[in-house]
Each structure stands twice: as structure tokens, then as C-alpha cells.
Image (tube, helix red, strand yellow):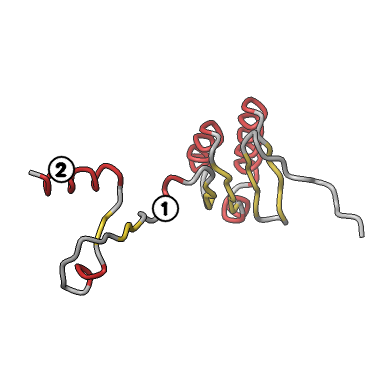
Amino acid sequence: MFDFLKKFAEQISGTTRMSPEEASGEEANDYVEVSPQKDASKAKVQIKYIVLTDYADIKPILDYVREGFYIVFAKIKELKAKDVTELKRAILKIKKTCEAVGGDVVGIDEDFILVVPSFARVSKEDIEQ
């Protein structure tokens, strides 16, 4: 019964207790606690990379902006080459959504845009040297 409770507690806490002797195949009463690794999926902010090839490709960007935990780096080169009018429409929709939730959009070079949530700002000024 004790072994069952011990394993149950280890599963709940995410730790494993193993003595140095158990690790080497021997038994002993001293234990070494091993902490679990951090789960990358529980990060507070994530960066997403999206390639825009069609107007419909902005839907995930809009969803990420609304959630507020994602920074989106979007490549717009393919949509720009395909249809500049669709690109302008897509960027306008992204800008309006960002303004509504307090986010920010900035163009990087001619082929990329950076979309950030409300807790971040992108400096659009050149750095003076």
C-alpha cells in the first residue's frame, strides 16, 4: 500500500525519488530527489513564424494577437508577389485587430512583419549612434 501511495504522490508532484544505490541496482534508505524538466509548452510568451500566401492565412495571426501570449513573425513576400491588393487588405485587418487589443505591428525589411501583443512595443525609431 505504501508503494502505491508513494508512486501516486510522485505522479502528482512530478518528481521521482531514487536512491543512488537503486540507480546502480542496489537498495538503500537514502533518497535523491530529481526535479522534473520545465515544459516548453508552458512558456508565458511564444514566438510564431507564419508565411502568408493568401488572405485566409491571417486568421491564425488574428487569433494569436487576441490571445495575447504570442509574438508573430510573418513572411509576406509570397502574398506580395501574388497580389499586392490582398496584402494591403491583410495588413490593414491585422493592424485594426492589433489596435483593438492594444498590440503593435511593424514592417521589417520589405518581406516581413512583426506582430506583438499589448504587453510589448516595437521601437520604430532608428537607434542614434
Q: Residue 86 is drawn in which quadrant?
A: top right
Which of the 4 quarters of the picture holds residue 106? top right
Q: Position of residue 84 (x, y in %)?
A: 65, 46
**In the image, farthest residue toward the bottom:** 24
Is residue 115 or residue 57 the one in the foreground?
115
Taking the spot 64% from the left edge, 25% from the top edge, the residue there is 100
Quarter in which the C terminus is drawn = bottom right
Q: Residues at badges 1 and 2 in contact (C-beta under 8 Å)?
A: no
Circle 1 crowding by C-alpha within 10 Å: few under 14, some 14–19, many from 20: few
Which residue carries the number 1 mark?
38
Q: Residue 1 has which mark?
A: none
Q: Is residue 102 left or right of residue 59?
A: right
Q: CA distance from mark 1 to mark 2?
A: 24 Å
Q: Nearer the viewer, mark 1 or mark 2?
A: 2
Q: Residues within 10 Å of mark 2 (few under 14, many from 20)?
A: few
Image: 9 above or below 34: above
Q: Amino acid at mark 1?
A: Lys
SS at circle 2:
helix
Q: Earlier in the sequence, mark 1 or mark 2?
A: 2
The residue depicted at 64 percent of the width and 32 percent of the height is 98
Residue 78's x, y, as percent? 57, 55
Q: Nearer the viewer, residue 93 or 89?
A: 93
The residue nearer to you, when weighing 36 against 68, is 36
Is residue 53 left or right of 77 when viewed as pictured? left
Q: Position of residue 30 (x, y in %)?
A: 25, 61
72 or 112, which lies in front?
A: 72
Q: Quadrant of residue 85?
A: top right
Q: Please state, as top left, top right, bottom left or bottom right, where the N terminus lies in the image.
A: top left
Count of picture labels: 2
| Residue that badge 2 annotates | 5
Q: Amino acid at mark 2?
A: Leu
- Per the image, label 1 sits on a secondary structure element best described as loop
